[in-house]
Amino acid sequence: MRRAAVAIAAGAMAVSLAACGSAEEAGGGNDSTASAAKGDDIKVGLLLPENQTARYEKFDRPLIEEKIKELTNGKATIDYNNAKQDANLQAQQVDTMITNKVDVLILDAVDAKAIKNSVQKAVDQGIKVVAYDRLAEGPISAYTSFDNVSVGKTQGEALLTALGDKAKDGQIVMMNGSVTDPNAAQFKEGAHSALDGKVKIGKEYDTKEWKPENANANMEAAISALGKDKIVGVYSANDGMAGGIITALKAAGIDVPVTGQDAELAAVQRIVAGEQYMSVYKPYAPEATAAAEMAVALAQGKSLDSIAKDKVDSGSAKGVPSVLVPVTSLTKDNINDTVIKDGVYTAAEICTGKYKAACDKAGVTG
């Protein structure tokens, strides 16, 4: 990934985000409870949930860290940890951040409900918490993510487009994400809003820990239960699971459209090759930029009014200042205008070896 290109994209998208409506601060982020004003020498804790999905280490972490450094003239200290999909480990990592006396914490929760007590402990020690990508429970001060219901709806609508008339006669399999992830419930809600009444859902699964191997096992079970000639498509909530699903489909000799999310490199290559129908491209630059801007502002005791233009409610907090980033349906037809244009991948990275001919046919360039 070329950082300069991503930085340019981040700047452009941040400007467009800053142009939307206004909101008041809530959830512990208001001026009356803000920490004493600080300069640029702040300490920021960054906790990400797992490393099986390529995005966190390749995009989110470097983008957040670079923006924090930019906003603080290189003076901020950043403490980082990845929970590797272990909620108990993440709770311990929050304790470590408290011990290390970070000024603010950016937290992408493994389990949004289980982390609630840890969030409270941090806030009790004067540490503001920015919920990143997943809406953690507890007294968070800010939140940034994508419009997750819209993500699911986008996936469902794309699948219906791919199915065409086949939607009337066949059955689909729905492979949702983990029940511990509040985003998964929102993706599912959005997908059902598009799919219900328009196609028969033969089997539906909530996939433990989002793991591709679990999605693969679920898909094998669905094929066994429904019969390979009855399945006309698969709703997959993300690209990692789509990879496991497609492996099971291939083994059974089934070729049907499969959705995804995250625009992972392997998924983009599968899309070019016709193995996966679509993914949801979520531009990580504006999400990371928003998290960094809100974290630095909170650490410095500043208002979020100029950054957070939305408000959301969690199970335990109301009116949380938020930045919600729009998404795009990524298909073979718009690879040039999305991940390549934004500098996420080059055509050379996508069009390796066996994908070269498919790229040429699809007109993937850049």
Image (cartoon, rainbow, N blue to C red):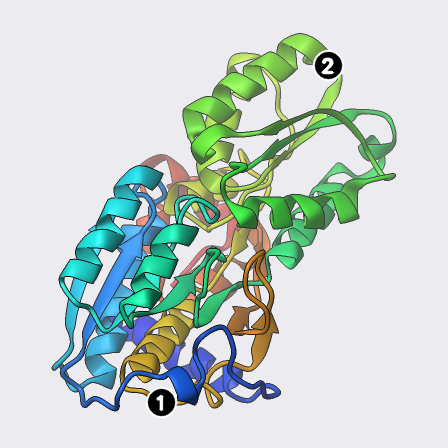
Q: Position of residue 48 (x, y in %)?
A: 31, 52
Q: Is residue 356 visible to us here?
A: yes
- State left or right for residue 203 relative to residue 145: right
Secondary element under disc 1, as helix, strand or loop, is loop
The image's mark for residue 19 is none
What residue appears at the point 70 percent right and 47 percent down from the top-left corner? 189
Q: Position of residue 75 (x, y in %)?
A: 12, 82
Is 323 drawn above or below residue 355 in the view shown?
below
The image's mark for residue 229 is 2
What residue appears at the point 55 percent right and 20 percent down from the top-left corner? 218
Residue type, numbered disc 1: Lys
Secondary element under disc 2, as helix, strand or loop, is loop
Comparing 301 with 19, the one in front is 301
Q: Nearer the viewer, mark 2 or mark 1?
A: 1
Comparing 38 with 36, the one in front is 36
Q: Residue 196's quadrant in the figure?
A: top right
